[in-house]
Amino acid sequence: MRNILIFIFLLVLALALLAFAQPRAVQKPVKDGAGPLAVKLDPRLVAPEYHSPMEWWRTHHMDAVTRGDFAEADCLHCHDATTSCNNCHSYVGVRQIEQKD
Ligand code: HEC
Ligand code: HEC
């Protein structure tokens, strides 16, 4: 009888530990996401035409900037370097954009 009680106790303990040991979702730099990596922009801003389609722009903005079509300073009229460039850049390991203000 006592062994059974100990067994049940250990089983419940193991299940409780399992429930807490689930890996937490890793935060990513997602627009309007949660956590410190979230990409944030003033909601009153409208994305310029050259951002369209956004999926393309997200992966090709570096080409436009390195090609010299835009200066980084142009981006910072709308973007805050800390909350909508560098949170993502730190995550992917790209150099930081300098905030000029
Ligand atoms: C006129 C304001 C404005 C300017 C200038 C601007 N952006 Fe944006 N950008 C936005 C807005 C608004 C969004 C968010 C659009 C949305 O998600 O609906 C955005 C989104 C982005 C995103 C995607 C973020 C994400 O995770 O979804 C990237 C990357 C980006 N911009 C880079 C740039 C770069 C690089 C420049 C300069 C070449 C630039 N932007 C200039 C307003 C601007
Ligand atoms: C959602 C993620 C994300 C956001 C937000 C973002 N970038 Fe990027 N950026 C990247 C990635 C990924 C790369 C590198 C891709 C590669 O070269 O492999 C990159 C590369 C760049 C590069 C080339 C860097 C170099 O020296 O090689 C520039 C310039 C740049 N981004 C400008 C900006 C600016 C300015 C903003 C804010 C207005 C911005 N990015 C916002 C993801 C992002």
Image: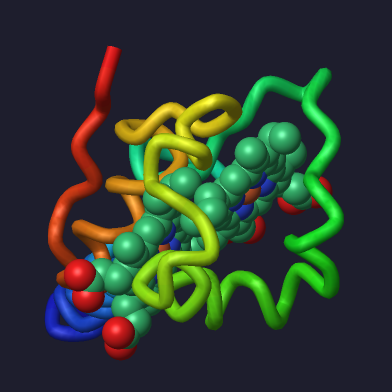
Q: Indicate the position of residue 41 as horizontal and vertical percent values.
A: 62, 30
As rendered, which of 36 and 81 lies closer to the eye?
81
Q: Is residue 51 above or below residue 31?
A: below
Outermost residue toward the top? 101
Q: Is residue 41 above or below residue 1?
A: above
Residue 30 in view (yes/no)? no
Q: Residue placed at 74% from the left, 61% from the top?
A: 51
Outermost residue toward the front? 68
Q: Indicate the position of residue 29 as horizontal and vertical percent values.
A: 44, 56
Q: How is the image coloured?
A: rainbow
Q: Is residue 55 above or below residue 50?
A: below
Q: Indicate the position of residue 62 as horizontal and vertical percent values.
A: 42, 73
Q: Indicate the position of residue 86 as horizontal and vertical percent values.
A: 29, 47
Q: Residue placed at 51% from the left, 33% from the top?
A: 79
Q: Residue placed at 29% from the left, 12% from the top?
A: 101
For this view, does 24 lie left or right of residue 51?
left
